[in-house]
Image (spheres, rainbow, N blue to C red):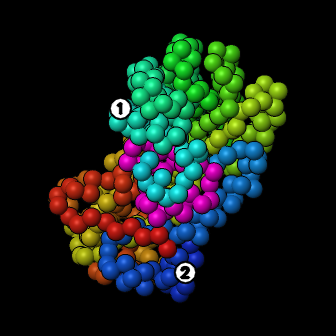
């Protein structure tokens, strides 16, 4: 007789403490926080966990590596201002994000801008602000030449390279093969020549192979290949490489069976690359650009149970927020096969009585499924459902206008 395999479980969500039966976030019991916010649904981000994550990374990464926050992961102005005081720089993906970063007090010299479809107005805004532009096409080079002449400011540029390899095991591939991001590696020498002819201020390269990777060996391999590619391309550069953004790709565990990323091999590899660069790229400043890894585990989404229904033996907990607020948890933001995020009843953390239940939102669509048949504490209307790992790609990545329901509240505590 073959023993049944134990189904995989979520990584423990032990970043938050529990007092009695209640989850604690920002030092407050969940029900008190809900009252302070004024109701549900809401996102809450724990500033102490944000600070702790940066401190942990500082211990692992070599001191010569700069840490940038990719604010597309979470552009809440209060959170960006907090992160700006912790990290070395901010990476933006639009003119709107640039405004938030500048208002948050980020040093313009340490802001970089990536994105495949930058509008001319955004390019002008960036040049005037004195930030670094990661150019992704020959069109951008031509526009920046005209803008630089118009403003009397040579645009600061790095070339975003679409490498000739992919980041293995990444949840979302952003480089390698045909991609809308960056300039294909084989075309970069021509782009570098154009940058030189146009008199732009070349500073280096940006390489981002992919994101949401939980395998240290895959990240190490991508960083090594990225460094080798940058070294090869530097021979055609119009100036020494002073900026080398090796991207990020650091993942966090969302689904059953996933384990947290081991940072030690990544730190050791970066130290070895920095040692090489002392002779091969002596002016290069290494940058690691992280979004999800910095903020994802520090956030929760909280929604209140409105109704409890049993349909042909299946229990449904109907809550006041859904995919309109948290598209990713519904499985409609890049998942190929839908899987549950880690979820608990936040005011019944140690409840003994359990049940298999599904959590559905208030929207009139079967896609509004937040939890599909998962073991939870037995819950009733009024109880609070908590979705963990919600600090990144939550509110700003969701269709909040869909079906006219109220917008979600976000708080930094």
Q: Image height check: is 198 above or below 383?
A: above
In this rendering, which labeled residue sits more in front, label 2 or label 1?
A: 1
From the image, tell me which residue sits under label 1. 120
Hey, which quadrant is residue 375 in on the image? bottom left
Q: What SS does tag 1 mark?
A: helix
From the image, tell me which residue sits under label 2. 27
Q: Image height check: is 291 above or below 405?
A: above
**Dot 1 alpha-carbon crowd within 10 angstroms: few under 14, some 14 to 19, many 20 or more:** few
What is the number of callouts on the image?
2
* 242 left or right, relative to 322: right
Q: Image height check: is 335 above or below 383?
A: above
Sooner in the amino-acid sequence: mark 2 or mark 1: 2
Q: Which residues are magenta?
A: 69-97
- Gap between marks 2 and 1 measured at Cα: 45 Å
The x, y position of residue 121, in whole percent, is: 35, 36
**Dot 2 alpha-carbon crowd within 10 angstroms: few under 14, some 14 to 19, many 20 or more:** few
Labelled disc at residue 36:
none
Q: Nearer the viewer, residue 149 or 276?
A: 149
Q: Nearer the viewer, residue 155 or 291?
A: 155
The x, y position of residue 42, in whole percent, is: 36, 70
Hey, which quadrant is residue 321 in on the image? bottom left
Q: Nearer the viewer, residue 244 or 49?
A: 244
Asked if one can make out residue 8 in the rendered structure from this viewpoint, the answer is no
The residue at 75%/44% (across/down) is 64
The residue at 59%/70% (across/down) is 48
């Amino acid at each position: 007789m073959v023993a049944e395999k134990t189904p995989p479980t979520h990584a423990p969500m032990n970043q938050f403490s529990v007092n009695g039966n209640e989850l604690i976030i920002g030092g407050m019991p969940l029900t008190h926080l809900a009252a302070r916010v004024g109701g549900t649904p809401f996102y809450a981000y724990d500033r102490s966990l944000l600070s702790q994550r940066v401190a942990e990374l500082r211990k692992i990464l070599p001191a010569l590596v700069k840490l940038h926050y990719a604010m597309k992961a979470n552009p809440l102005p209060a959170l960006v201002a907090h992160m700006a005081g912790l990290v070395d720089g901010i990476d933006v993906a639009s003119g709107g994000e640039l405004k938030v970063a500048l208002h948050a007090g980020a040093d313009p010299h340490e802001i970089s801008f990536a994105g495949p479809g930058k509008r001319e107005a955004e390019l002008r805004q960036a040049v005037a602000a004195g930030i670094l532009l990661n150019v992704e096409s020959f069109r951008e080079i031509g526009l920046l030449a005209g803008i630089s002449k118009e403003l009397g400011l040579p645009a600061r540029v790095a070339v975003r390279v679409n490498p000739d390899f992919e980041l293995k095991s990444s949840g979302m591939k952003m480089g390698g093969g045909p991609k809308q991001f960056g300039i294909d590696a084989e075309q970069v020498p021509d782009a570098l020549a154009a940058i030189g002819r146009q008199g732009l201020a070349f500073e280096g390269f940006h390489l981002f192979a992919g994101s949401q990777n939980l395998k240290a060996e895959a990240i190490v391999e991508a960083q090594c290949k990225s460094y080798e590619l940058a070294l090869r391309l530097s021979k055609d550069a119009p100036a020494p490489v002073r900026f080398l953004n090796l991207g990020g790709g650091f993942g966090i565990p969302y689904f059953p069976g996933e384990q947290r990323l081991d940072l030690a091999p990544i730190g050791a590899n970066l130290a070895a690359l920095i040692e090489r660069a002392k002779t091969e790229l002596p002016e290069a400043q290494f940058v690691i650009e992280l979004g999800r890894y910095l903020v994802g585990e520090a956030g929760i989404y909280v929604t209140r149970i409105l109704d409890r229904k049993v349909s042909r033996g299946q229990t449904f907990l109907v809550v006041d927020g859904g995919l309109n607020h948290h598209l990713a948890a519904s499985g409609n933001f890049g998942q190929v096969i839908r899987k549950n995020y880690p979820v608990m009843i936040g005011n019944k953390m140690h409840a003994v009585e359990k049940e298999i239940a599904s959590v559905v939102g208030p929207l009139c669509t079967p896609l509004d499924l937040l939890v599909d048949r998962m073991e939870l504490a037995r819950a009733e209307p009024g109880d609070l459902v908590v979705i963990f790992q919600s600090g990144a790609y939550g509110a700003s990545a969701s269709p909040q206008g869909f079906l006219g329901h109220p917008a979600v509240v976000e708080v930094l505590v």
